Image (tube, rainbow, N blue to C red):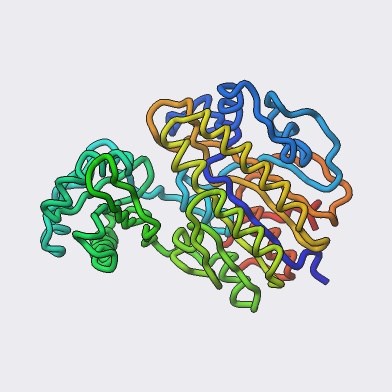
């Protein structure tokens, strides 16, 4: 018998919990996303996370030392070489990344890439800088509305983003342009993790807003994942948020897009209540990263954590006896650090189930992949050659 029938893995995107041993190599010495947020907020009101043992991982103001018989907690180190979304999520599913994806934050994309994109789309490119998506459409949106040019920009992530007004360039056509960009960026010298379509609407800089028609075209994982292993053995892998994009649909049995963290929790709770699947539900809550980490807004980040904590209480209430809930993160994004880049950090691991009766703080783990390795073991599966990760024995 499998110990858990349904496993819910929720990624609080970018909620790092302290610098990695090699943080200096990434210029991230001293980073601690959760701790520094709590300091700027003069503590956090997180009674549900507190009841699961958060204090054992990071004794932040607002948390207390408690017994937590139904939850295990630990800190996970990242084995891969990187600090981005795809690297972190892929590692959870058994993929080791040794060569980081390329970023073009400092100088924008090479002229040769831009020229090829212009030639193949028949449209001129403007922008080509690292920028906030909301700010660049304020700056260039009116021009794009008049000329039909493509707003191309990047960020601290390994991404090439194309923004266009939906009334000037229909969404379907923008997706086609992004497919062209994806083909160009398969060349080793341009290899970015994701191409992202960023359609927007509005009449002027004061009313422009991005629409829910965002579309990511990611690279497929470089190795067979634990999600694929589950799918190939008949288990369900429903995904909520941008998980389907991060894995380019590989190993995903169904995908549900979300508009916000709140929407993501709504849809996760709905799935808990109404779906009798067997397997892994993989959830990403992106706003911690996109709205607060990159924008260096520790107070907003802290409020988002507190809001999540409220929804976490609702989620725990409806979990079944044979459900397992895992909460973790994919990298750090310390909002008190300089710039807008991710930070090279360890991440929290919190596992809750009514079946757990000896919950405690576990030893630090060497890889995010221990999550996926433990999940497949629960379903009596063994890793394929090249998949990394060790079983968290206490959990099973």
Asked if residue 261 is positioned above or below residue 107 in the image, the reply reads below
Q: Is residue 344 left or right of residue 121?
A: right
Q: Is residue 112 visible?
A: no
Q: Quadrant of the C terminus?
A: bottom right
Q: Is residue 312 visible?
A: yes
* Image x and y of residue 37, in percent: 56, 28
Q: Nearer the viewer, residue 174 or 84?
A: 174
Name the image quarter holding residue 395.
Answer: bottom right
* Image x and y of residue 293, in percent: 47, 36
- Residue furthest right as drawn: 357
* Image x and y of residue 198, in percent: 32, 54
Name the image quarter holding residue 108.
Answer: top left
Q: Is residue 83 left or right of residue 42?
A: left
Residue shown at 88% from the left, 47% from the top = 358
* Image x and y of residue 382, in percent: 68, 68
Q: Quadrant of the N terminus?
A: bottom right
Asked if residue 18 is positioned above or below residue 233 in the image, the reply reads above
How many numbered marks, from 0 up? 0
Residue shown at 71% from the left, 41% from the top = 74
Asked if residue 385 is positioned above or below residue 87 in the image, the reply reads below
Asked if residue 115 is positioned above or below residue 120 in the image, the reply reads above
Residue shown at 60% from the left, 49% from the top = 368
Q: Nearer the viewer, residue 363 or 237?
A: 237
Residue shown at 81% from the left, 51% from the top = 394
């Amino acid at each position: 018998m499998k110990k858990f029938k349904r496993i819910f893995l929720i990624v609080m995107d970018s909620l790092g919990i302290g610098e990695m041993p090699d943080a200096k190599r990434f210029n991230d010495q001293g980073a601690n996303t959760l701790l520094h947020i709590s300091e700027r907020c003069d503590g956090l009101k997180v009674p549900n996370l507190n009841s699961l043992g958060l204090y054992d991982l990071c004794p932040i103001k607002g948390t207390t030392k408690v017994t937590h018989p139904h939850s295990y907690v630990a800190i996970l180190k990242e084995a891969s070489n990187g600090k981005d979304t795809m690297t972190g999520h892929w590692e959870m599913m058994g993929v080791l990344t040794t060569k980081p994806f390329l970023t073009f934050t400092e100088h924008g994309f090479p002229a040769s890439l831009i020229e090829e994109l212009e030639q193949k789309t028949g449209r001129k490119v403007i922008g080509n800088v690292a920028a906030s998506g909301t700010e660049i459409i304020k700056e260039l949106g009116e021009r794009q509305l008049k000329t039909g040019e493509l707003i191309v920009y990047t960020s601290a992530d390994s991404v090439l983003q194309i923004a266009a007004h939906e009334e000037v360039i229909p969404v379907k056509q923008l997706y086609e342009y992004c497919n062209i960009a994806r083909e160009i960026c398969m060349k080793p010298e341009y290899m970015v993790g994701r191409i992202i379509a960023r359609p927007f609407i509005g009449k002027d800089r004061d009313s422009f807003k991005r629409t829910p028609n965002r579309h990511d075209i990611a690279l497929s994982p470089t190795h067979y994942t634990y999600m694929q292993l589950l799918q190939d053995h008949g288990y369900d892998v429903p995904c909520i948020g941008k998980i389907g994009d991060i894995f380019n649909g590989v190993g995903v049995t169904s995908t549900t897009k979300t508009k916000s963290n709140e929407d993501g929790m709504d849809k996760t709770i709905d799935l808990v209540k109404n779906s009798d699947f067997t397997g892994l539900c993989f959830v990403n809550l992106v706003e911690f990263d996109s709205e607060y980490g990159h924008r260096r807004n520790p107070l907003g980040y802290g409020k988002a954590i507190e809001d999540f904590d409220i929804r976490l209480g609702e989620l725990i209430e409806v979990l079944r006896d044979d459900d397992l809930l895992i909460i973790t993160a994919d990298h750090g994004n310390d909002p008190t650090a300089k710039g807008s880049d991710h930070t090279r950090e360890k991440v929290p691991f919190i596992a809750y189930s009514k079946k757990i009766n000896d919950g405690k703080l576990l030893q630090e783990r060497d890889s995010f992949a221990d999550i996926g390795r433990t999940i497949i073991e629960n379903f009596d599966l063994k890793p394929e050659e090249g998949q990394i990760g060790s079983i968290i024995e206490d959990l099973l």
